Image: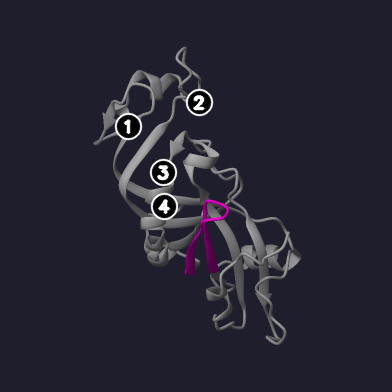
Amino acid sequence: KTASHRPDIFNDVTIKKNHAYLYVIAMGAGDYYGENKNGDFFWEKDLIKYHPKFLTSGVFIQHDNKDPNKSKGKVLKSVYNKKMHRVELLIEVKKQLAPDIYNAIERGDRIAVSMGTKVVEESCSYCGHITKDSLANRCEHLKRHMHQIMPNGVKVCAINHPPLNFFDISIVRRPADTQGYAMFQKTASVSESGFNLYKTA
């Protein structure tokens, strides 16, 4: 793949020794890709408005995010790629905090990511029931028929309502969003010369 559509804002990053950098797809717009594996659907208009929240997000492992001090790095850049209808992030991982991840990036392993967000409410795509307080209060469609296509042709999923508060981008074994993988990755080890953010893994 070419990187010609990627914005120039990814060129002004200071590369640090013993840090790893991942250019990842955080999530796709439900308008174009549908719901993720968890059944969560996000409108493109909401991702365009709220994706900058990722800039205050931590970088965690397997969504172990209750303690902010467990973050292994930070999000340096967040952009909405209108051509591909998805949120893309540049994240930095510190070797000292996550040596296993750093080494995996150095080996060129395929890295998967998954986002975490807080929402005020969600609604069922089929019946419109709104859930605010607890997932236990979901309608029967979301509890028992997630991803199913109902007799009227509507696919059951949970439509997340704004505001969206993205607080976590995690490195995971299996992402909920099928797009959730690193596109480009690179380590900054002893030598920092010749670094290229657009180098393919």
4 and 1 marks in contact (CB < 8 Å)? no
Q: Mark 1 sits on what residue?
A: 123
Identified by mark 3, the residue type is Trp
Which image quarter holds the C terminus?
Answer: bottom right
Using the image as rendered, state which of residue 80 and residue 16 is in the foreground: 80
Asked whether the residues under the numbered discs 4 and 3 touch, taking CB atoms below 8 Å apart as contact, a structural biologist would say yes
Residue stretch rendered in magenta on the structure: 74-91
Q: Is residue 108 left or right of residue 174?
A: right
Q: Could you tell me which secondary element the residue under label 2 belongs to? A: loop
- Does label 2 or label 3 sit earlier along the sequence? 3
For the point 43% across and 50% down, which residue is it?
A: 116
Neighbour class for label 4 at 10 Å: few (<14), some, many (≥20)? many
Secondary structure mainly formed by the magenta segment: strand
Decide: is 65 above or below 105. above
Can you tell which mark lies on residue 147? Answer: 2
Labelled disc at residue 43: 3
Q: Observer-nearest residue: 70 or 44?
A: 44
Q: Amino acid at mark 4?
A: Leu
